[in-house]
Image: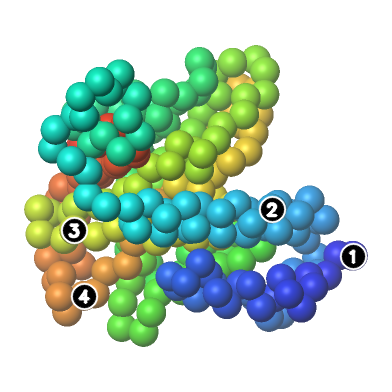
Amino acid sequence: MPDLTDEQMDAVGEYAGLLLVKYDANNRIRLLPREDVEAYDKKQAELEALRQAQEEAQEKPEDSETQPEGDTGNNPDKKPVEVKYDKLEDFFVLPEGISIEYTGARLTKTYPDDGSEEIMSLDAAPGKKLLILCFDVTNHTGEKQSLDIMGMNASYKIEVNQSFKKGILLTLLLKDLSTFRGDISANSSTELVLITEVDPEANPDVIEGIETIVLRLKNPDKTCTVKLQ
């Protein structure tokens, strides 16, 4: 039965410098299939590469309002175009036959919160709650399809009730939509999530009831606003 190395256990605590990801300490990790542990190890490396790329992008100077003379339109520093979409797949430009459907939101203290066996879990900070946005990603074709959301270099901001506005948490969770890179089996669906953290004292209206949710996405080419509910 596979074990995690000391380096892998230590890496969990880093959580890409954003939030602590905790292992279940009750030997559950020893009962997981080897492919699950390998998937975690691979995602850890991918997330670190994504974090470094985002840091490098933030260090670049502000874009110029005017396009340099003689520019052919392939300027890597140009500002993204703002576009409004009704569906997430329009922003992501997914493989043919793949759809993403928002299925709902919930507040919880930990994820996963349904008792499912995951390689890791995520707990909210003391006094706060996790806001989980759930999406069904469906492969409508008769063949396995590869999906690389992480490679699309998108950033995400969640707006709730027009008052709460916050970016998502980048996690090592295998079901994190923003960092998903894997296969969707033929004629099947998988649930992926986006997660942020809510302070009940600062945002009591979100805790009392979620009325509207808007998701704002941005990549180097375009920004997008999608009303989820």
Q: Which residue is mark 1?
A: 1
Q: Which residue is mark 2?
A: 42
Residue at image location 55% in from the left, 24% down from the top = 139
| Above or below for 134 versus 102 | below
Q: Is residue 210 left or right of residue 176?
A: left
Specify few, some or many for label 3: CA neighbours under 10 Å numbering under 14, 14-19, or 20 or more: some
How far apart, in angstroms, are the residues tagged by discs 1 and 2?
Answer: 19 Å
Residue 118's tag is none
Image quarter hosting the N terminus: bottom right
Task: Tell me which amino acid carries mark 4.
Answer: Pro
Q: Earlier in the sequence, mark 1 or mark 2?
A: 1
Q: Earlier in the sequence, mark 3 or mark 2?
A: 2
Q: Position of residue 123 (x, y in %)?
A: 46, 74
Disc 4 secondary structure class: loop
Specify few, some or many for label 2: CA neighbours under 10 Å numbering under 14, 14-19, or 20 or more: few
Residue 200's tag is 4
Disc 1 secondary structure class: loop
Residue at image location 14% in from the left, 71% down from the top = 204
Q: Earlier in the sequence, mark 1 or mark 4?
A: 1
Disc 2 secondary structure class: helix
Q: Which residue is mark 3?
A: 165
Q: Position of residue 55 (x, y in %)?
A: 41, 59
| Above or below for 48 versus 136 | below
Can residue 212 be spotted in the picture? yes
Of marks 4 and 3, the one in the foreground: 3
How far apart, in angstroms, are the residues tagged by discs 4 and 3?
Answer: 14 Å
